[in-house]
Image: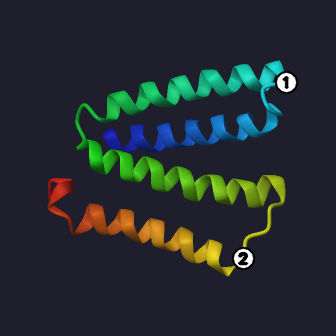
């Protein structure tokens, strides 16, 4: 269940970060408010996740998924151009999270 909650938390964080961009420096009240609500909800969900999942593992997946997701959102939603190094970087982030979860004893396995 904690993996599902973690995925939901990352998705909410991606919504919050996208709304942050759309808030135009918090000058758009609707997107500014939505940003704050989403970040608050994302942190609440994360607080539930770390009840049953090691903090380091939860945060590595949270941060890695967030970084990769925001980069891809920037490209798909806002038309930001990604070069080869961006894709390599995303791959390295994902590889690090996979190694941490699959091979490290820190994951509890």
Q: Residue 93 appears at what percent x and percent y? A: 46, 66
In the picture, which quadrant includes the N terminus? top left
Q: Residue 34 appears at what percent x and percent y? A: 70, 24
Q: Residue 37 appears at what percent x and percent y? A: 61, 21
Against 55, is 92 above or below?
below
Spot the residue most to the bottom. 84
Q: Residue 109 appears at what percent x and percent y? A: 14, 59
- Gap in angstroms between the C-alphas marked 1 and 2: 31 Å
Tell me the residue that label 1 is attached to: 28
Q: Residue at x 33, y 35 (%)?
A: 49
Q: Is residue 45 left or right of residue 72?
A: left
Q: Residue at x 72, y 35 (%)?
A: 20
Earlier-in-chain disc, 1 versus 2:
1
- Secondary structure found at label 2: loop
Tell me the residue that label 2 is attached to: 83
Are there few (<14), some (14-19), or many (20+) residues within 10 Å of tag 1? few
Against 16, is 80 above or below?
below
Spot the residue most to the front. 25
């Amino acid at each position: 269940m904690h993996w599902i909650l973690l995925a939901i938390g990352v998705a909410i964080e991606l919504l919050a970060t996208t709304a942050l961009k759309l808030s135009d420096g918090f000058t758009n009240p609707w997107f500014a408010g939505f940003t704050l609500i989403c970040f608050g909800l994302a942190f609440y969900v994360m607080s539930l996740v770390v009840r049953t999942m090691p903090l380091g593992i939860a945060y590595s997946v949270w941060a890695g998924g967030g970084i990769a997701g925001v980069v891809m959102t920037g490209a798909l939603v806002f038309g930001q151009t990604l070069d080869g190094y961006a894709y390599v970087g995303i791959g390295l982030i994902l590889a690090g999270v996979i190694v941490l979860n699959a091979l490290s004893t820190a994951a509890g396995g």
